[in-house]
Image (cartoon, rainbow, N blue to C red):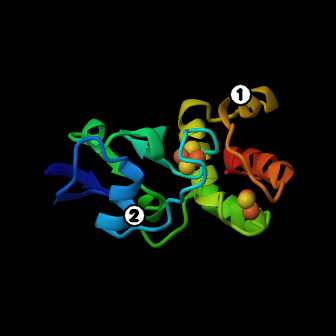
Amino acid sequence: MARLTVNGKALEVTADPSTPLLWVIREQVGLTGTKYGCGVAQCGACTVHLDGAAVRSCMMPVAGAEGKQITTIEGLAGGSALHKVQQAWFDHEVPQCGYCQSGMIMAVAALLKDKPKPTDADINAGITNICRCGTFQQVREAIHAAAKA
Ligand code: FES
Ligand code: FES
């Protein structure tokens, strides 16, 4: 049994403590916006926030998320308006297939909390998510736009 808080909602799930948080979020909580890509913390498709920090949930045991605020792409906006990163993604038509994009957006939202006006070097260092469609240039433009919003 694990007690979690996901997008502000307290819930209990039955899972082995070592189960990756990704699978608990997708299969038990039923929030499928968080994606599985590599399973070894390399691609970033599974990025969620734990107490506001970006983590790769495929390698995070669910036990490590107990007592923390878990935020997924479904809870990022926190209301009817889009989060500024989502709005910038929309305005700059960033996604191609879209598979990597929820993780990308979550990573960028966390970066902007730490560095509200990131330089290209900050982006290179902070956003290491992989996009097989090659949206990196649009991602960079949208990050700069979100930083100005
Ligand atoms: S699925 Fe977690 S980093 Fe790739
Ligand atoms: S938009 Fe297709 S993998 Fe990134």
* Residue 69 occupies quadrant: top left
Q: Is residue 101 left or right of residue 58?
A: right
Q: Is residue 31 left or right of residue 3?
A: right
Identity of the residue drawn at 36% across and 39% down: 51
Q: Residue at x 50, y 66 (%)?
A: 33
Residue placed under numbered mark 2 in the picture: 26
Q: CA distance from mark 2 to mark 1?
A: 28 Å
Q: Secondary structure at mark 1?
A: helix
Q: Give coordinates of residue 125: x percent, y percent.
A: 71, 27
- The percent coordinates of residue 75 (x first, y second) are 41, 61
- In this orientation, does residue 112 appear? yes
Q: Quadrant of residue 112?
A: top right
Residue beneath label 1, please?
Answer: 125
Decide which of tag 2 and tag 1 comes sooner along the chain.
2
> What amino acid is found at the position of numbered circle 1 in the picture?
Ala
Residue type at mark 2 is Arg
Please tell me which residue lies in front, 109 or 59: 59
